[in-house]
Amino acid sequence: KDLAKRFFILLHLFLTRHYERIELVFIRHHTVAKVVEEEEFFHSTESGGTIVSSALELTVEEIKERFPVDQWNIYIAQASDGDNWDSDSPRCKELLLTEILPRVQYYSYVEIEAEQPQSLWLQYEEAQASASNLALGRIRNRADIYPVLRELFAKKPSSMGTK
């Protein structure tokens, strides 16, 4: 949790310092997801089993209710230790491909401290093969946080207008 919080703190600082008009939505989950205030997001010590699809389903609801895709540029960052019920990870991939990625400009997933890629990573990696707006990164220790953040959010050359 410490590495994920550090990742999100750096991302939060970057966003609030570089963009004037943004709206941040914080979603926490274990077996059930909920939208929380910034304070709770960064300071809650809640733990328990993990069903990641609950957070993705809530993300879809939030986008549909609050962020019409014709009016918002939507960017999502997710961090997890990758621990998820194996039966839930395919559902997460399905939600990403059918509900979330078609609605967002960019989605980044960071897996924290996993020695080997977990089932969630493997499903997201499969999704990435057909989704240019999905990026993945792995953080194993504090020294990895900034390089991964920088890589995930580096300006990519645009293919528009180039020959």
Image: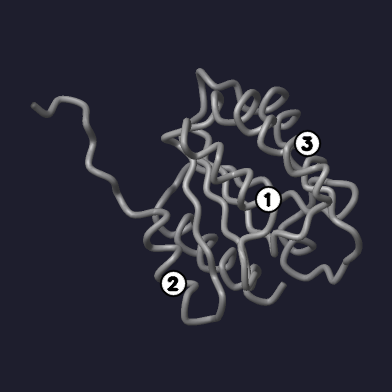
Name which of mark 3 and mark 1 comes first in the sequence. Answer: 3
Q: Callout 3 environment at 10 Å: few (<14), some (14 to 19), or many (20+)?
A: some
Is 51 above or below relative to 4?
above
- Residue where numbered disc 3 is placed: 58
Which residue is painted at 59% across and 44% down in the image? 124
Q: CA distance from mark 3 to mark 1?
A: 18 Å
Horizontal side of 160 relative to 136 (left or right) equals left
Label 1 packing within 10 angstroms: few (<14), some (14-19), many (20+) = many
Q: Position of residue 162 (x, y in %)?
A: 12, 29
Instruction: Identify the residue at image location x=23%, y=36%.
Output: 158
- Going by the numbered disc 2, the residue's amino acid type is Tyr
Dots 1, 2 in contact, CB < 8 A: no
Quarter residue 83 falls in: bottom right
Q: Amino acid at mark 1?
A: Leu
Q: Residues within 10 Å of mark 2 (few under 14, many from 20)?
A: some
Position of 80 with respect to 71 (left or right) is: right
Marking on residue 146: 2
Q: Label 3, secondary structure: give it.
A: helix
Alpha carbon separation for disc pair 1 and 2: 22 Å
Q: Position of residue 16 (x, y in %)?
A: 49, 56
Q: Which residue is mark 1?
A: 120
